Image (tube, grey):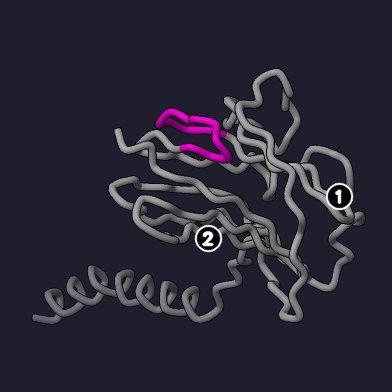
Amino acid sequence: MKNLTLFLFLAFAPLVSFGQHEHHQAKNDTTVKAKSPRTAAMAMVGGNHVHIEYGAPSVRGRNIWNGLVAYNQVWATGAHKATWIEISNDVSINGTMLPKGKYGIFTIPGKSEWTLIISKDWDMHLADDYNEANDLIRLKVKPKKSKDLVEELQYQVKETGKDQGRIEISWEYLSVGFDFKNSGK
């Protein structure tokens, strides 16, 4: 009996120790949240699934416009990898037809006017390999100021009417956006 007790103790002692170690690790987890986590915005607009994926940096007290994000230079409109949009149906943006598919979203911020860009290129680090020749749509828009701080870069896909929607990009105290309409195909 003494040998059986000793055998059971030796057999299960490591399991008890392992369980306590795992519990200790969970209590003292020092995992750091990404400063610019990859996130997504999506919605159904009519029968069109619109999906945007982007890196969402935070203000964290920094000077954003013409500081962290330079004026008059192409920006991936997010952090790390270029921001992309995927649409399940054809859309019209400012009178230009955009076939269903996956595209890059880039911007050229300016003090009083921005250029919003939809590009064939979507899979790259930031705007490192950006090529203007691959632009499908370019829109000039005026940034709107807000009194409310948007700490983390945010994209929104909004349904605005039957088969119509809007993409809004907000960060710090500014927002820009564009409207689109499903093609009806």
The residue positioned farthest toward the left in the image shown: 1
Q: Position of residue 142 (x, y in %)?
A: 76, 55
Question: Eyeballing the image, is 179 above or below 8?
Answer: above
Q: Position of residue 43 (x, y in %)?
A: 39, 56
The residue tagged with tag 2: helix, strand or loop? strand
Q: Is residue 154 left or right of residue 114?
A: left
Q: Which mark is residue 110?
A: 1
Range drawn in magenta: 92-103
Residue occupying the point 34% across, 55% down: 162
Most foreground residue, 179 or 154: 179
Give the quadrant of the C terminus. Answer: top left
Which label's residue is closer to the chain start, 1 or 2? 1
Question: Eyeballing the image, is 53 above or below 153?
Answer: above
Give the quadrant of the N terminus. Answer: bottom left
Residue occupying the point 88% across, 42% down: 72
The residue positioned farthest toward the front in the image shown: 95
Report the magenta stretch's main SS: strand
Badge 2 amino acid: Gln
Q: Which mark is residue 156?
A: 2
The residue tagged with tag 1: helix, strand or loop? loop
